[in-house]
Image (cartoon, helix red, strand yellow):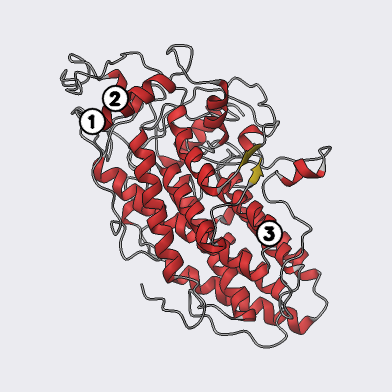
Amino acid sequence: MDRRAFLMAVARLAGPGLAMLMFDPSGSAGAGGFDDGLRDAFGARFHRRPGPRHSRRPQAARSWVHHWNAIAIDASGLDHTPVETGEQRVFGENLGPGRSSRAMAITHIAIFDAVNAIVGGYRSYTGLDPAPDGTSMRAAIAQAARDTLVELFPSQRASFDEQLEEDLGLIPDRSARAKGISVGKGAAAAILAMRAGDGSQQPEPRIGVDFTTGNKPGQWRQDPVSQIPLALGARWGEVTPFVLRSADQFRVPPPPSMGSVEYTAAFDEAKRLGGDGLVTPTERTPEQTETGIYWAYDGTPSLCAPPRLYNQITVRIADQMGSDVVELARLLALVNVAMADAGIAIWEAKYRYRFWRPVTGVREADEGSGPTGQGDGNAATMGDPTFTPLGAPASNLDGPNFTPPFPAYPSGHAGFGGALFQTLRRFYQTDRIAFTFVSDELNGVTEDHQGFVRPLRPRSFSSLSEAEEENGQSRIYLGIHWAFDKTDGIALGRRVADAVFQHAFVPLGEGATR
């Protein structure tokens, strides 16, 4: 993918003269030719282990949720890919981590409410009435997903319609099909109505146009490497949460002062481990470099933002645990709503504190550097005026790598990961879930910013906590985050996940107040 074409596409989306890069995604990779064990590690794959049986929970139904989850996250991946000549599609209809997490939450609320209307047992998010007997679950899932996706990614409508027609064509019982269509339409319409006017449609501010960055030490400024002139997500904290009472309900405390021991340690770690290895020497090992890339999904072509990665991991683990259709629909609703609310909470905090990234903090640490010449005021830090981080990988582009265009604290990756893995812990009531997963960043297909195909590198984890920690630490290896961004980001994501798990999609008979 030509980087110039990508930047021009983003520029047209966000405004005149704008050229930016994005966040974390995951493109699909075929697994043909690999053995079954390795194929299982490629994202959302089916295990043959049977799930619990229920008279109204046909085993095949789990694959229907799988199918539309894959359609949804791949639509988001395509949404982050510039339009080719002659292609009838719009680039960036729900671009970036906040918007893509909201889109996935809406779709999976509709799917869950449609499934739950047929099977029952849990409180509906939208208040959808129970379905009549003989309702086709396949039709309900497909219609609910299609109707939400058409609203979220309207230029991809033809693809969604084709998928819907194919699914409905496999249901011979006309009455059951019609009932399912009605339930799916109702579920989608209900959540779309609830999210109308939620504050998500505000345009992204541009630095120097409708957003001003600070010049004082510690204040976030434009990335000097990529010079992306965007304050991405600056208004996302104003979006109405799905479950939280407000975006600041669990707001993290301010970042540590620049003269503190904690900041000094984080500074040293980012400087030692985060350099690109060319302009800036690094002590990062090859495995640590691989770890940084593995979790990236930084909004580049075909990949999308972090929510796509975390949906892939969710489905991978759900398959491994043998979850049935209702459990899978509920889990995906919980995970995606937790991530959507975590995204709102994280970006609210990011723009409240507006703390600088390592690329600025390391370059401007010494007295005489930076706009004010004050440095960071910490005698224990030693700056490097040419510090160049490894950066978020410009996958499927021709470079350079970049620092995401929004403040550092707290980390979005860490927060999304905290929301994901805490939800999984609560859902399965254990942290001890070992799993293997292949990231689309290292799938033997995706190219780095120099055009070289990255190798296939499955990674295995002994527990959810191990994966959660590595996900957060990966951003330090890229040189784009501080340690406290990770620590407080994970904590915030976990708190949001706990709130969502307690108040949404709960079994009937349990309290569910906002």
Label for residue 470?
A: none
The residue positioned 23% from the left and 32% from the top of the image is: 219
Badges 2 and 3: C-beta atoms under 8 Å apart?
A: no
Q: Nearer the viewer, residue 33 or 220?
A: 33
Report helix, strand or loop for mark 3: helix
Q: Is residue 349 above or below residue 9?
A: below
What residue type is disc 2 on?
Answer: Gly
**Left or right for 82, reference 19:** right
Residue to which mark 3 is pinned: 66
Work out whether mark 2 precedes mark 3 in sequence or the reverse, and give the earlier one: 3
Q: Position of residue 108 (x, y in %)?
A: 56, 63
Badges 1 and 3: C-beta atoms under 8 Å apart?
A: no
Residue to which mark 2 is pinned: 361
Q: Nearer the viewer, residue 109 or 119?
A: 119
- Tally of marks: 3
Q: Hey, which quadrant is residue 3 in on the image?
A: top right
Work out whether mark 1 precedes mark 3 in sequence or the reverse, and give the earlier one: 3
Q: Position of residue 113 (x, y in %)?
A: 56, 74
Report helix, strand or loop for mark 1: loop
Q: Identify the image quadrant of the N terminus.
A: top right
What residue type is disc 1 on?
Answer: Gly
Q: Hey, which quadrant is residue 304 in on the image?
A: top right
Marks 1 and 3, how far apart at CA: 44 Å
Badges 2 and 1: C-beta atoms under 8 Å apart?
A: yes
The residue positioned 79% from the left and 58% from the top of the image is: 48
Label for residue 218?
A: 1
The residue positioned 60% from the left and 74% from the top of the image is: 114
Work out whether mark 2 precedes mark 1 in sequence or the reverse, and give the earlier one: 1
For label 2, the crowd category at 10 Å Cα-Cα, with few meaning under 14, some 14 to 19 and many 20 or more, is many
What residue type is disc 3 on?
Answer: His
